[in-house]
Image: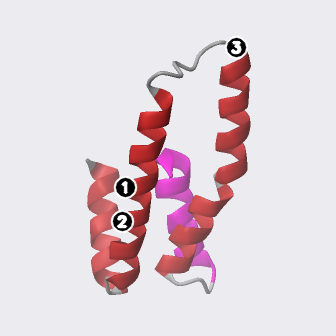
């Protein structure tokens, strides 16, 4: 979810709202769909996307997100927080 979404938004959602940590994480990820899409369109029109590479990166990211989501949804909240925090610090 990036720096803003990952560290700030998820933390704020989980601390300042009644959302669970999993709900905060999922909501933050969902909120990034439109901005990422519009940015990709802008970069496409500016000629900044290497289309012979991008589909492979997108496929890998989609697979990783799916598997990560499955793993995360099966982890207890405390373990998910620790894993997410470690990933943000890495």
Q: Position of residue 7 (x, y in %)?
A: 46, 56
Tell me the tag on residue 46: 3
The residue depicted at 34 percent of the width and 84 percent of the height is 74
What colouring style does the render use? secondary structure
Sooner in the amino-acid sequence: mark 3 or mark 1: 3
Q: Which residues are magenta?
A: 1-17
The residue depicted at 57 percent of the width and 60 percent of the height is 29
The residue depicted at 27 percent of the width and 79 percent of the height is 79
Q: Disc 1 on helix, strand or loop?
A: helix
Q: Position of residue 47 (x, y in %)?
A: 64, 12
Are dots 1 and 2 in contact, CB under 8 Å?
yes
Sooner in the amino-acid sequence: mark 2 or mark 3: 3
Distance from disc 2 to disc 3, alpha carbons, whole Å, reads 32 Å
Q: Disc 2 on helix, strand or loop?
A: helix
Q: Quadrant of residue 31?
A: bottom right
User: Along the horizontal axis of the image, is 83 left or right of 43?
Assistant: left
- Nearest the eye: 82 or 39: 39
């Amino acid at each position: 979810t990036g720096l803003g979404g990952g560290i700030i938004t998820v933390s704020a959602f989980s601390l300042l709202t009644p959302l669970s940590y999993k709900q905060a994480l999922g909501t933050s990820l969902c909120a990034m769909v439109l901005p990422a899409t519009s940015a990709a369109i802008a970069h496409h029109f500016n000629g900044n996307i290497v289309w012979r590479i991008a589909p492979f990166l997108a496929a890998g990211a989609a697979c990783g997100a799916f598997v990560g989501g499955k793993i995360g949804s099966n982890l207890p909240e405390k373990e998910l927080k620790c894993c997410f925090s470690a990933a943000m610090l890495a």
